[in-house]
Image (tube, helix red, strand yellow):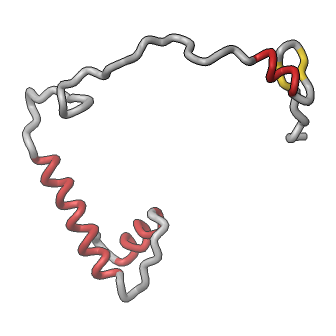
Amino acid sequence: MSDQIDVHKVARLGALAVSDDEVAAVGQKLNAIVGLFDQLAAINTDGVEPMAHPLDQVQRLREDVVTEADIHEYVQQIAPKVEAGLYLVPKVIE
């Protein structure tokens, strides 16, 4: 970080409490982090295809079938208020 103002700005954005005594140490740590990003940016990635996951695996999917009993009518019978198959609830926003 270039100066105390930048460190305080980053700390505020990150919701971090940084005292004036800690500014120099936090600034050095932030500079180290930014340095790591600079190293990553310097890597030649020409010809490297982006990937969603580092392992070449396929997600096992189950069949999309109903496994639960239909209790819609039963639940509607015990609901306080129902209209046209929908649950009626009190208005909460005016």
Q: In the picture, residue 26 is in which quadrant?
A: bottom left
Horizontal and vertical percent position of residue 23: 35, 81
Specify the quadrant of the image occupied by residue 31. Answer: bottom left
Q: Does 87 sit left or right of 14 as displayed?
A: right
Total marks in image? 0
- Residue at position x 7%, y 39% in the image: 44
Where is residue 6 shown, x and y percent of the image? Answer: 37, 70
Residue 45 image point, x, y percent: 10, 35
Furthest residue to the bottom? 21
Residue 53 drawn at (x, y percent): 24, 32
Residue plotted at (9% across, 31% down): 46
At a point 30% along the width and 22% down the height, the residue shown is: 59
Residue 32 found in image quarter:
bottom left
Asked whether, in this view, residue 21 is left or right of residue 79, the answer is: left
The C terminus sits in image quarter:
top right
Which residue appears at 86% of the width and 40% of the height? 93
Q: Nearer the viewer, residue 49 or 23?
A: 49
* 80 to 16, vertically: above or below: above
Work out which quarter of the rendered image holds the N terminus and state it: bottom left
Is residue 19 shown above or below 49? Answer: below
Q: Is residue 21 above or below residue 78?
A: below
Q: Nearer the viewer, residue 81 or 36?
A: 81
Q: Is residue 73 above or below residue 12?
A: above
